[in-house]
Image: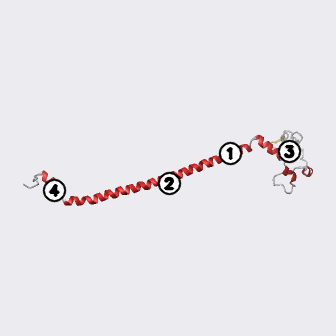
Amino acid sequence: MGGKPELKGRAARLARLLPPVGGRGQAARAPFVLLVVVLLGGGLIGLLVLNSAMSEGSFQLDDLKQETKELTDEEQSLQRDIDAYSAPRALQRRARELGMVPGGDPAFLAPDGTVKGSPSPASAAATPLVIAPEALTQSPATAPPGTEPTGPAATAATPAPNPTPGR
């Protein structure tokens, strides 16, 4: 008897379906091993590229967080400045520096044109008047638009308001 037993019946049919063991089976393993190596190498390279992209995204995220923090700090600083300038005492101080005085009693116009209330002019004597140095040196021609001239020359040139209400 040789090295191989004979198979009969069903076992023989199954044995024909399987490839024979020998040199040909060894040759079929080389492409499979090469395929596995290529897949593993490609997977490692893909993982490296993915890791690098995530690191770059992380650096960009850190930069954007830092920029957001700086802009938030600047916004808070500007908001503090706005709050300081719009405080009632600051507004009153700046108004006095510009030569403004508190107004008198107001009058209101009704939709039909009648005047409700009795208006009275503002009196400069009721409150101390502080004039800004720039206002004293500006002539009416060189004053910025929207400002009224102040000082003795401006008082003589400005007509008195009409005390009677008109339509």
From the viewer's perspective, is the residue at label 3 or at label 4 nearer? Answer: 3
Q: Is residue 143 above or below residue 163?
A: below
- As drawn, the residue found furthest toward the right would be 156
Residue 82 as seen in the image, left or right of residue 28: right
Give the Cα separation between the discs numbered 4 and 2. Answer: 58 Å
Residue receiving disc 1 = 79
SS label for mark 2: helix
Q: Is residue 35 visible?
A: yes
**Mark 4 nearby-residue class (10 Å; few <14, some 14–19, many ≥20):** few
Q: Amino acid at mark 1?
A: Gln
The N terminus: image quadrant: bottom left
Q: On residue 16, which mark appears?
A: 4
Q: Are marks 3 and 4 in contact (CB under 8 Å)?
A: no
Q: Position of residue 46 (x, y in %)?
A: 41, 56
Q: Is residue 148 visible?
A: no
Q: Amino acid at mark 4?
A: Arg
Q: On residue 122, which mark appears?
A: none
Residue receiving disc 3 = 130
Mark positioned earlier in the residue sequence (3 or 1): 1
Residue receiving disc 2 = 56
From the viewer's perspective, is the residue at label 1 or at label 4 nearer? Answer: 1
Give the Cα separation between the discs numbered 3 and 1. Answer: 29 Å
Q: Position of residue 72 (x, y in %)?
A: 62, 47
